[in-house]
Amino acid sequence: MADVEGLVGARDVKASGSPSVRGFHLKGCEHLDWGMKNRLSRIIKPDTGRTVMLAVDHGYFQGPTSGLEVMEDTLRPLIEHADCLMLTRGILRTSVPPGSQVPIVLRVSGGNSIIGDDLSNETWNVTPEDCIRLNVAGMAFSIYVGGKYEHQTLAAFSELIDAGYQAGIPVLAVTAVGREMARDARYLSLSSRLAAEMGANFVKTYYCENFERVTTTCPVPIVMAGGKKLPELEALTMAYRAVSEGAVGVDMGRNIFQSDCPVGMIKAVKAVVHHNEKPEIALKIYEEEKHTAKVA
């Protein structure tokens, strides 16, 4: 028991209405438990309400990928600049230093490969218990709305939502687009809204024309998927438009690790996402880093 000698009584104070404690910086997440909010705040930064996630989970269905042949070499210079890493548990355990403080969104869906007949044939293949062991901040699951295995992925996704709430781990719905699915506002807003209605805490989807339709009709945060490798200015412009039209950030992979200067590119993307830097200005950050690396 604490020593009561010299104990001073509490002062009379007025009721605190501090919005910094009572509010939350992400839409649709005010009702979540403290642990869920804490994990989301590690992924999507409270000071800007934005995030630059680095997606390096491509190998889970396509094996060695250009730029990801040796994961330690790819990640080593980039980890300190990423707000979050999206990867598989195998790569986390083998290629990320345990002392790293970067938050992890773990890929927990899989079960097919690029040589299979249908890329939508995925299911839940990592348990929340393993996610807890790995101290992850979020779990990522691909849903294939309109795909051959739509029901399978949505049913498994629903089970993961329940498990995520039980474990206190937010779930990221990845609105995957199959070979026959259109990347337009109608389809992406349908997929994103469906994911949110099922309980997703945030959603990753592609940029498209009329992207505001996607972000405004989704009641939880949207993170833009980087997609295929583009010229650097085009990728920065896409990121700028996405956050200007309601996205809370980007989850870029190939547009960073397949760049001829990955560090310069992730720095440029962060300038766009966190500081609303114009693409042309951010491109100079990339070019300066590229020049410095070449000189060194």
Image (cartoon, grey):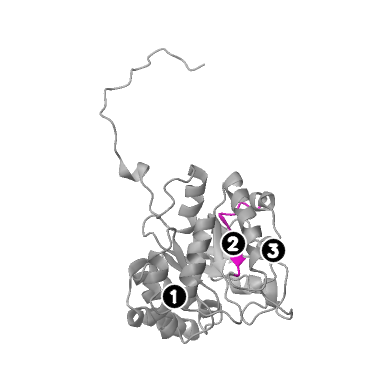
Locate residue 240, reporting x and y percent.
37, 75
Marked residue nearer the N-terminal end (3 or 1): 3
In this view, the residue in front, 97 or 209, is 209
Q: Amino acid at mark 3?
A: Thr
In magenta segment, residue 140: yes
> As shown in the figure, which amino acid type bears the numbered disc 1?
Ala
**Viewer-nearest residue: 3 or 52:** 52
Judging from the image, what secondary structure is the residue with disc 2 in? strand
In the image, residue 29 sits, relative to residue 21, either above or below, namely below
Q: Give the foreground label among 3 and 2.
A: 3
Which amino acid, mark 2? Ala
For discs 2 and 1, the disc positioned in front in the rendered view? 1
The answer to whether any part of residue 81 appears in the image is no
Drawn side of residue 35 relative to residue 93, left or right:
left
Residue where numbered disc 1 is placed: 185
Tell me whether circle 2 and circle 1 mark residues in contact (CB < 8 Å).
no
Q: State the residue in front, 290 or 44.
A: 44
In space, the residues marked 2 and 1 are separated at their CA atoms by 22 Å
* Label 3 crowd (10 A; few <14 / some 14-19 / many >=20): many
Which region of the structure is painted magenta? 134-144
Q: Is residue 44 above or below residue 290?
A: above
Q: Quadrant of residue 236?
A: bottom left
Label 3 with label 1: CB-CB less than 8 Å: no
Residue pointed to by mark 2: 140
Q: Is residue 86 left or right of residue 236?
A: right
Q: Is residue 78 above or below residue 234?
A: above
Residue 123 shows which numbered tag?
3
Q: Earlier in the sequence, mark 2 or mark 1?
A: 2
Element under label 1? Answer: helix
